[in-house]
Amino acid sequence: MYKAILVNKDTWWVGVNDCSTERFEALWSLPNGVAYNAYVVLGEKTAAIDTVKGPWGDEYSYKLEEALGGRDLDYLVVNHMEPDHSGLILELRRRWPNLQIVGNAKTLPLLKGYYGVTSKTLAVADGDTLDLGGHVLKFATIPMVHWPESMVTFDASTGVLFSNDAFGGFGAHEGGLFDDQRERPRWEEDMLRYYAAILGRYSSGVQVALKKLGGLPIKNIFPAHGTLFRTDAQQVVDLYDRWSRCDTERGAVVVYGSMYGNTRRMAEAVCTGISESGVKEIRLYDASRTEADFILRDIWRYCGLALLSCTYNMLLFPPIEALCSKLLNRMPKNHVLGIAGSYSWASGAFPALQAFAEKARLERAEPDVEVFTSPTAEDLARCEAMGRDLGTKVIARTQDR
């Protein structure tokens, strides 16, 4: 996206595409890049909504100047202090020395800590407004979605919610910025993968935020990452409501860690059992080959989860261990869990999966399965039985879906 784009009345997108960074937050895969969305609203006064990551400063500055059309920038609204959104604060202050930086009480210490900025700041609280002349910006804090200082900005004149990381998604813009310029499955999967990786742990905070924002007459939702929503804002709010309540769909995710194929055969038998139960949406993942964010995305979507691991150095196979850690950190609910482990000379994976299951506190599929060396026909039959039980319980939990 090589130029500033008018996205609503007097409102310009001045963001950038990042197709170079390999891992978001040095953790999450970016096979299709990521967009840093930033905006500027032009009234009698002018206000930028967030900036972008530092290395994209030249492109951002060019677009911002283009949108301003020779005018000064009066305000910078900082919805979120994470450096991929605040990375050019000092550059803007150098360009416009009288720039007022707007944030909430929890923004200002971070502003000082990251950039040493302590002057010409304006602290706002829930419900406060900033009249630009022709556009009135209203502020609402959404703490822990996903940082403590996170807030959103609502333009009462246009009905645009500048939503920060909320409602954001992975993926760089490919031609168009808006939801009606992309197929829904694409942007919804990008959103869910982002939600599961970045916001999933803070689902209770998301619920609080949705209730707080429920009274606003929102027409458009413009997030800090991913697709901009102009056709039906409520559909996006409904998705966030469902995901933050862990309202899962009928389907199952089977994840395995296998060095020599024996645990993979067990996982395939589990899938057979799930299919025999009548569940049609089944995702089978090798934890060594599939990025964790894609696995988390589908775990967040589907009700059934089976984890299978070989033993490695008397412990869980490392990719499965890492996935279990991520799941416990995010505390997903409304799932049915099945577990199976294998070993050759010392049992380790199965006891570790049992410990994980106790901490996860999810409904269990039976039987648990532990296999010595290579699975026998009887072992595989037990894996199929676990899959059938998991699928039956998933169907019972998702009767209304």
Image (cartoon, rainbow, N blue to C red):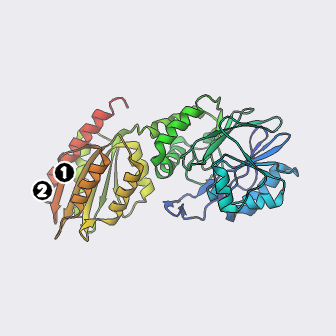
The residue depicted at 33 percent of the width and 61 percent of the height is 321
Q: Is residue 324 left or right of residue 144?
A: left
Residue linked to disc 2 = 377
Q: Is residue 236 left or right of residue 345?
A: right
Q: Nearer the viewer, residue 397 or 382?
A: 397
The residue depicted at 24 percent of the width and 50 percent of the height is 270
Q: Is residue 239 visible?
A: no
User: Where is residue 161 drawn, in percent x and y?
Assistant: 66, 38
Disc 1: CA contacts within 10 A as few (<14), some (14-19) or many (>=20): some
- Asked if residue 271 is positioned above or below residue 9 in the image, the reply reads below
Mark 2 falls on what kind of element?
Answer: helix
- Give the spatial CA distance, label 1 vs label 2: 16 Å
Residue linked to disc 1 = 368
User: Where is residue 227 drawn, in percent x and y?
Assistant: 61, 46
Q: Nearer the viewer, residue 40 or 352?
A: 352
User: Where is residue 226 drawn, in percent x and y?
Assistant: 60, 49
The residue depicted at 27 percent of the width and 50 percent of the height is 357
Count numbered badges in the picture. Answer: 2
User: Where is residue 61 drawn, in percent x and y?
Assistant: 77, 58
Q: Which mark is residue 179?
A: none
Looking at numbered disc 2 in the image, what kind of residue is underneath it? Ala
Nearest to N terminus: mark 1 or mark 2: 1
Placement of the N terminus among the 4 image quadrants: bottom right
Mark 1 falls on what kind of element?
Answer: loop
Disc 2: CA contacts within 10 A as few (<14), some (14-19) or many (>=20): few
Q: Nearer the viewer, mark 1 or mark 2?
A: 1
Looking at numbered disc 1 in the image, what kind of residue is underneath it? Asp
- Asked if residue 146 is positioned above or below residue 10 in the image, the reply reads below
Which residue ends up furthest to the right in the rendered image?
A: 70
Placement of the C terminus among the 4 image quadrants: top left
Q: Mark 2 and mark 1 in contact (Cβ < 8 Å)?
A: no
